[in-house]
Image: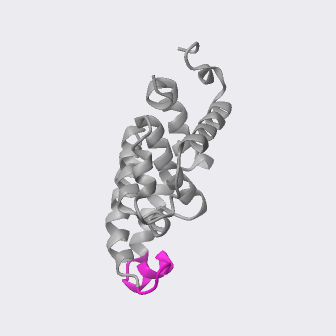
Amino acid sequence: MAEKWPALLKNDDALLDELHKLLTDRVQGDAYSSDGSFATNLALLPKGLRAMAATHWLDVSLTLDSITWHFGNFGEPGLVAETEAGLLELSLDELANVFREARDLMVPLLNQRTTDGQDPYEVLASHGLRERGNEIDGRAWDLCNPTFGKETIYDAWVRYVRNRPEDVFGT
């Protein structure tokens, strides 16, 4: 296998760097766009690489903000569907369940925003749902917290590519 995919000989950190470079080279478009073009472009990738491209932005959100905030930046329906599918493809089933809960809470609320770009936490608070949002955020952080030895989304990428390189690099 290493003859066909030499990147697999690298340690986990170097392999992750290789995956980030591959995504930078192959993924086109703006994940923040609301026109669906980013998700459409993801469909052109092998399924494992597509899962990584879709879940990258969730990892960013969990690091910088939260899973509920994620939908304020990346709530385009096609990308939301790709992200959920990506979590399942990467065998992050528990996180996929929390993602669905956050989606079901946030998407209807964000569609009712009175101002474009209104803070997602303000939206939750204005509907009396800030505590529910906090609970969902906490569960997502509990699942993806390297400080407490929890697997991150990027750890799942490395595990996935080592087991199924053809679904990332292609055949």
Question: Where is residue 51, by image quadrant?
Answer: top left
Q: Position of residue 148 (x, y in %)?
A: 59, 47
Q: Nearer the viewer, residue 146 or 99?
A: 99
Q: Is residue 150 visible?
A: no
Question: Where is residue 149, by image quadrant?
Answer: top right
117 inside magenta stretch: yes
Give the residues drawn in magenta, as a range. Answer: 114-130
Q: Nearer the viewer, residue 113 or 64?
A: 113
Q: Position of residue 48 (x, y in %)?
A: 44, 35
Q: Is residue 11 visible?
A: yes
Q: Position of residue 107 (x, y in %)?
A: 35, 69
The residue shown at (58%, 15%) is 2
Position of residue 171 relative to residue 158, above or below, is above
The residue shown at (51%, 78%) is 119
The residue shown at (68%, 32%) is 14
Q: How is the image coloured?
A: one colour
Q: Nearer the viewer, residue 124 or 109?
A: 109
The residue shown at (52%, 25%) is 162
Position of residue 94 relative to residue 171, above or below, is below
Position of residue 163 relative to residue 38, above or below, is above
Q: Nearer the viewer, residue 46 or 48?
A: 46
Q: Give the mark count.
A: 0
84 inside magenta stretch: no
Q: Quadrant of the C terminus?
A: top left
Q: Position of residue 73 (x, y in %)?
A: 50, 67
